[in-house]
Amino acid sequence: MNVWVELVGVDGLPQRRQIAVVERIVDGACLDDLGLSLGEGKAIQRRLQEELVQFQTDQAGQQDRKCHDCNRLRGVHDYRSRTVHSLFGLCRVRVPRMRICACGKTARSGTGSIETLLSGRATPELERIQAELGSRLSFREAARVLGLFVSAARPHNHRTVSNRLAKVADQIEKWDVASPYRISRASESAVSVFIDGAYIRAVPGYQSRHFEIATGRVVSQGRPPRQFAAAPSVTTGKHDVVRAAMRAQGWLPGRDVTVFSDGEIGLQSIVLSATRQPVTHILDWFHLSMRLRHIEQAWEGIKHVHDLNIYLWDVAVHVPRLRHLLWSGYVREATRAVKHMLSQLDQHAWLRHTNNKLKRLYELVRNLRTYLVQNKASIVDYCRRYWSGQPISSSPAESAANSLVNARMNKKRQMRWSPIGAHRVLQVRAAVGDGRLKQAKLALAA
Ligand SMILES: [Zn+2]
């Protein structure tokens, strides 16, 4: 099989060139010989790419030769060699250097000139793919996978992957800061922020062994949800990342924001600094429900023990009620019930010394009281919300934490991160997850 390319430039004259010959035997051919091998495929792709890149450069060179002022053709002084890394291999191109035109004007570079065509050392597509792979796999694995399918002059290197990822991550953030103000107009719907925290291991020498990532989702009706994640002490700040995500979802300062979290104060305050205005906070129902479940189970385990029912009849009455009260948002009643339970448990404190399970129940109820006091403003009528189809939990944030943080930075992976390194990987992971990386094409020139 002979592979030829035919190139047709602006002059309309076709040029043909052979780029590859593939040979196969007929006798004794087997499945191994069927079709192109990976090596052949890579070689053909690289040759195709070289042809196209050189051809485009030549065409741009022809344009450049025309003087913009007097329309005469300028002479070629000499040729230099330039290299561009592309998804299909390293391309070396011959680039002409023009003489100064007889009219004395120097060339200006604009659209269609060689300078714009070859304005980087790598094509943006290659950079995006290196970044995406680096966000999904460890940098070393990403380099290995790229090496399998993508031809390169030298073997792919984990440092290149990490550098490209850094570059793309910075572009994503710049794009985030620049674009929301354009996109955000005309959105009237309320914005919900689901936020959660996740810990990852820090590099040796960092101020602590672990640091916390704030991660989650911003949801606005009629738009695909948007993920965000931010590491501490990065120049942009966690709240800047949240704010950029909210703006991109059409939020405007002054509009309502609902925040869902497990009640951690730090997470709420990130959203507060992002909005710089009061927000409605809703405590995740499942975190609350889990605490109730522990109490229910603890009571279930001891309620049949001889006279406990008699001594602790308040507990016996209130334990089954708590869930219903809180599900319907009756925080004050629930808090009062918990108070009664506690005072009764205190009255019969001697029981605790003989029964470890009762001691545990006591601890659980006491913790619940603190939890209710801390979060009383954030407990809502979950029942009504649930039946009207509104969210009642921060689970979208937890799934963001799983897909963004845990899948790549799990403690089991033995990786250690610097905040900035983690931050960059997270920016790319979030953009990949949302489909923003492709969509944006990251054209940042404007
Ligand atoms: Zn001229």
Image: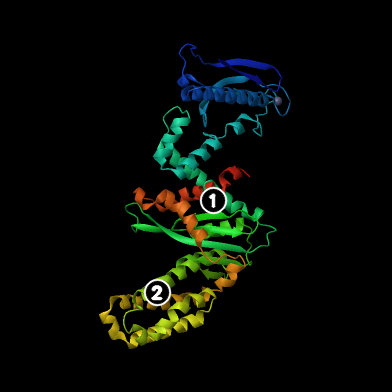
In the rendered image, the residue lying farthest to the left is 354
Q: Is any part of residue 240 visible from this angle?
A: no
Residue at image x 36%, y 52%? 411
Pick whichever of labels 2 and 1 is earlier in the sequence.
Answer: 1
**Quarter holding residue 32:** top left
**Nearest the eye: 329 or 235:** 329
**Nearest the eye: 161 or 413:** 413
Q: CA distance from mark 2 to mark 1?
A: 45 Å
- In this rendering, position of residue 397 left or right of residue 340: right
Residue at image x 59%, y 20%? 77
Q: Which image quarter has ligand 1?
A: top right
Q: Which label was assigned to residue 173?
A: 1
Relative image position of residue 156 (x, y in whole percent)? 43, 33
- In this rendering, position of residue 348 left or right of residue 151: left
**Nearest the eye: 102 or 339:** 339
Question: Which residue position holds label 2?
Answer: 295
Circle 1: residue type: Glu
